[in-house]
């Protein structure tokens, strides 16, 4: 038996539909009268009729959204290899086949709008089919039929020639690139952040008066949170002569029980298989050691020290403290960014409600993008510049990108200093891919949050007939998932029980389009880059170098700037306060800030008194 229409939200769907043509023509009093008439009419329907009508309206709304999504997907797929504007500079362009697939989907979407309009129109009482709602539905029906016929005629007439032209142009572009050995070689300026600078994020001279460490004591701990692979606790270091906080460190107590027999999570064989714990490290620790102190490493959460206890299948990792929490915490923190808390936007995603609700400001999103891409480059080759990179470097594949694993540290004074620095965290499921890796692809089973995993992380999946290896492009996918979450106000396009991607269905292999609110609010340049990161074929995704070049292009003052001049804006600039206010992101206060009075911080009230371990002395 179908659920009652009230439980399924049908009364509101019916009201919205019947009011739509009148919203711009009636005054508030007339609208109220019309609303009451519509509600009274709904109450005369039987439960069967309500469910029938509500279901048809729901199908109509779904068809409109699918059409809107398909239009936007065609728009970004127009930049394919061999397109008229392809000069070979964008090596990440998708193949013509993706464009063709998107056009065919748009054709089907218009046909679905046609059918759903007709069914809904015919379901209305005969005497009402000529009213304003009926005329509006007939207008949509005619538009849908006309557009579908136009696309069908165009494809039948021109598509074969367009495909051949694209293939020929692609061959010519690739021939020229080979002749000039012209694969992208975007040089990057060195990030001035050294390991020393990194440590100043969590430890500093603020208020310490240059006193000796003999007058400093560690106080702890306070539980911060945990999951299936460990728990995190906070330590504060206090200068006893001033009573001020001079350092803060997070101790992650990691458990390796679940990884004990998995060779790719260890540097020299899994202890559960070799029986030897004397000569191996978890890849999580090795990853931190490999990245620590390198230019660009401030885009990751740094490990300051560690204590290995493999006889207990565990370890303590001493990590920098990120005072502004993680991206999931902020997204859920009541600041108004969640679509689930924005009813009009969640119920009518094909309409623009960006002026009614809060979305993350575009400069903030560019800032997050910049730091995540920097982390991706560092994992790819161990340094920021392409020239002189170590040919034997093992690519680090994070394998657990999601907003839970993105943290906000102290601001970067050189790039978007008005926002906390975005940092990639939790390398517990990372693996190292050496050059010419010979491991069986299937042995690198999916780990982490499965619904956020890139296609090539699905062990049973073959792309273009070949099982793909995980690579730096897998990290590109992960960056795309995080950025999509920020732009969409949702927990990625792969949220549990609401998964868009279906790897077996070719129509559901590419990322979903953002809703109309996000499309209207964000620049096309930002949206296109984010969507490109999540393409099904890893070879169709942009490289990190290309992403960085585009981010710099669109955040550098000038005609291409989409970050409102905020990337390098100094706090001394006369417009600094005004521009920051216009693109503000609220964050909680740093309640354990360096230089703050320990007694006033409230830390003492929450601690579970613990003896400071020796490893903290090393910090």
Image: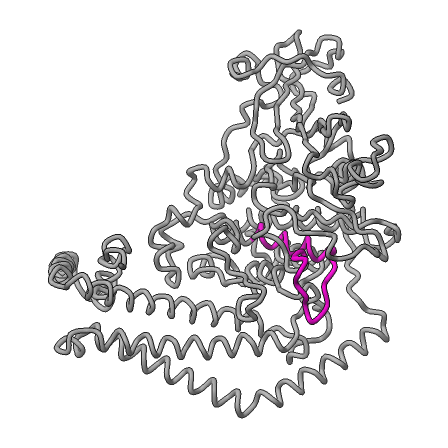
Residue 570 in view of the camera? no
Residue pictured at 52% horizontal, 69% vertical: 73
Residue pictured at 34% horizontal, 66% vertical: 61
On the image, the x and y values in percent for residue 101 come to: 56, 76
On the image, the x and y values in percent for residue 557 come to: 62, 54
Residue pictured at 46% horizontal, 40% vertical: 332
Question: Is 464 one of the magenta-colored residues?
Answer: yes
On the image, the x and y values in percent for residue 173 come to: 76, 78
On the image, the x and y values in percent for residue 197 come to: 74, 32
Identify the colour scheme used: one colour
Residue 225 in view of the camera? yes
Q: Using the rendered view, name the quadrant where residue 574 is placed.
A: top right
Left or right of residue 53: residue 515 = right
Against 236, residue 476 (above or below) is below
Q: In front here: 538 or 205?
A: 538
Question: Is 235 one of the magenta-colored residues?
Answer: no
Against 457, residue 161 (above or below) is below
Q: Using the rendered view, name the quadrant where residue 148 is placed.
A: bottom left
Left or right of residue 520: residue 76 = right
Tell me which segment is drawn in magenta: 457-483
Left or right of residue 122: residue 384 = right
Q: In front here: 436 or 89?
A: 436
Query: Which corner quadrant holds the C terminus?
Result: top right
């Amino acid at each position: 038996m179908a659920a009652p229409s009230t439980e399924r939200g049908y009364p509101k769907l019916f009201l919205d539909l019947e009011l739509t043509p009148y919203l711009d023509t009636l005054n508030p009093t007339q609208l109220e009268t019309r609303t009451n008439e519509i509600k009274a009419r709904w109450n005369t329907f039987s439960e069967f009729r309500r469910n029938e009508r509500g279901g048809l309206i729901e199908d109509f709304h779904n068809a409109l959204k699918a059409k809107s999504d398909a239009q936007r997907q065609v728009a970004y797929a127009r930049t394919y290899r061999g397109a008229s504007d392809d000069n070979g500079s964008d090596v990440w362009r998708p193949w013509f086949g993706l464009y063709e697939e998107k056009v065919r989907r748009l054709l089907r979407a218009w046909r679905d709008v046609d059918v759903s309009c007709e069914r809904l129109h015919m379901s209305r009482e005969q005497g009402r089919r000529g009213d304003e709602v009926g005329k509006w539905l007939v207008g949509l029906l005619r538009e849908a039929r006309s557009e579908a016929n136009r696309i069908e005629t165009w494809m039948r007439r021109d598509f074969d020639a367009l495909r051949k032209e694209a293939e020929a142009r692609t061959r010519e572009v690739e021939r020229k690139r080979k002749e000039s050995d012209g694969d992208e070689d975007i040089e990057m300026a060195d990030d001035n952040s050294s390991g020393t600078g990194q440590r100043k994020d969590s430890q500093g001279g603020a208020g310490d008066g240059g006193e000796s460490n003999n007058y400093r004591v560690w106080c702890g701990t306070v539980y911060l949170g945990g999951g299936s692979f460990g728990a995190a606790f906070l330590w504060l270091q206090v200068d006893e002569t001033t009573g001020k906080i001079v350092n803060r460190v997070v101790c992650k107590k990691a458990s390796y029980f679940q990884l004990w027999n998995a060779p790719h999570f260890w540097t020299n064989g899994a202890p559960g298989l070799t029986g030897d714990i004397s000569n191996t490290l978890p890849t999580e620790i090795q990853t931190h050691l490999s990245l620590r102190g390198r230019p660009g490493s401030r885009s990751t959460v740094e490990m300051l020290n560690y204590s290995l206890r493999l006889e207990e299948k565990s370890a303590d990792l001493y990590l920098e403290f990120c005072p502004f929490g993680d991206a999931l915490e902020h997204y859920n923190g009541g600041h108004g960014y969640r679509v689930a808390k924005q009813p009009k936007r969640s119920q009518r995603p094909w309409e623009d409600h960006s002026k009614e609700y809060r979305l993350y400001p575009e400069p903030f999103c560019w800032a997050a993008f910049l730091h995540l891409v920097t982390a991706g480059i560092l994992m790819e080759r161990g340094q920021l510049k392409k020239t002189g990179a170590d040919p034997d470097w093992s690519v680090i594949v994070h394998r657990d990108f999601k907003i839970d694993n993105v943290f906000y540290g102290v601001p970067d004074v050189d790039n978007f200093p008005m926002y906390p620095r975005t940092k990639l965290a939790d390398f517990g499921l990372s693996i190292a891919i050496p050059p010419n890796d010979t491991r069986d692809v299937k042995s690198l089973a999916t780990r982490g949050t499965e619904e956020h995993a890139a296609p090539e992380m699905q062990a049973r999946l073959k792309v273009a007939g070949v099982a793909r290896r995980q690579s730096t492009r897998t990290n590109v996918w992960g960056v795309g998932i995080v950025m999509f979450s920020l732009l969409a106000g949702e927990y990625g396009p792969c949220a549990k029980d609401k998964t868009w991607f279906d790897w077996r269905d070719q129509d559901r292999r590419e990322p979903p389009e953002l809703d109309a609110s996000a499309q209207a609010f964000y620049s096309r340049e930002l949206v296109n880059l984010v969507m490109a990161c999540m393409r099904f074929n890893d070879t169709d995704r942009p490289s990190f170098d290309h992403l960085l070049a585009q981010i710099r292009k669109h955040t550098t003052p000038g005609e291409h700037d989409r970050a409102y001049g905020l990337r390098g804006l100094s706090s001394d600039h006369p417009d600094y306060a005004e521009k920051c206010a216009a693109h503000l992101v609220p964050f909680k206060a740093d309640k354990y800030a360096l230089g703050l009075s320990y007694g006033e911080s409230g830390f003492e009230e929450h601690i579970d008194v613990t003896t400071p371990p020796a490893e903290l002395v090393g910090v």
